[in-house]
Image (cartoon, rainbow, N blue to C red):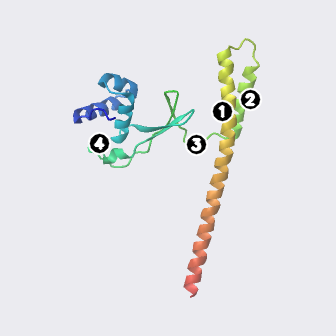
Amino acid sequence: MRGKQWRVDEERQLRTFLEEGKSFREIAEIMGKSLVSVKAKSFNLGLKSLVVATDVLQFSVASAAAATSPLAPVPAVAPEPVRVAVVSGVELKLPDELPTVKEELKIMAAAVNALNQPGLSRSEASRLQKVIFGVKAYEELFVKAVNYEGLEKEVLELRRQLAAETNKNNKQE
């Protein structure tokens, strides 16, 4: 079931609110729209981001559709996408570079040491255990990512060699 169509003035108002830094939830309340409707419309207009939910995390990537939206000014240079992770409703900027496994292991060691402190509240102990679990998952994923990068480089090099060999053979014929 579809809701009411957005009017052009509502789309402009949505753009203004997003430029002012208002959250989707605030905008939904102000405009009397559902949260889902505000998020969907902002993505369709290329104004904010698309949120893809997983079991634990939500990842969003800024839309490239902004340049094609009739309401959007055409930028001279396409903007870099804003990479954001949404965790429990909190937007976190994704780092440009991944931390090394060694850096993450230091965080895990600090969390393990903190767990040994007397008088730790149950919620703080739970949070530290989640940090440790997160570091373990990060390490596994980091190793996979490094392996994939290595495989990609190897495949690209083999393709380059094959193309060079093919060109060499074609020239000889």
Mark 3: which secondary structure? loop
Q: Position of residue 11 (x, y in %)?
A: 27, 35
Residue 32 visible at all: yes
Q: Earlier in the sequence, mark 1 or mark 4?
A: 4
Q: Position of residue 22 (x, y in %)?
A: 37, 26
Looking at the rendered image, the quarter that the N terminus falls into is top left
- Amino acid type assigned to the residue bearing label 2 in the image: Ala
> Compared with residue 77, is residue 35 higher up or lower down, i.e. above or below?
above
- Amino acid type assigned to the residue bearing label 3 in the image: Glu
Looking at the rendered image, the quarter that the C terminus falls into is bottom right
How far is disc 1 from disc 3 in space, using C-alphas?
Answer: 18 Å
What's the residue at 65%, 22% (across, down)? 127
Q: In front: 33, or 169?
A: 33
Q: Earlier in the sequence, mark 4 or mark 2?
A: 4
What's the residue at 66%, 38% (across, down)? 138
Q: Earlier in the sequence, mark 2 or mark 1?
A: 2
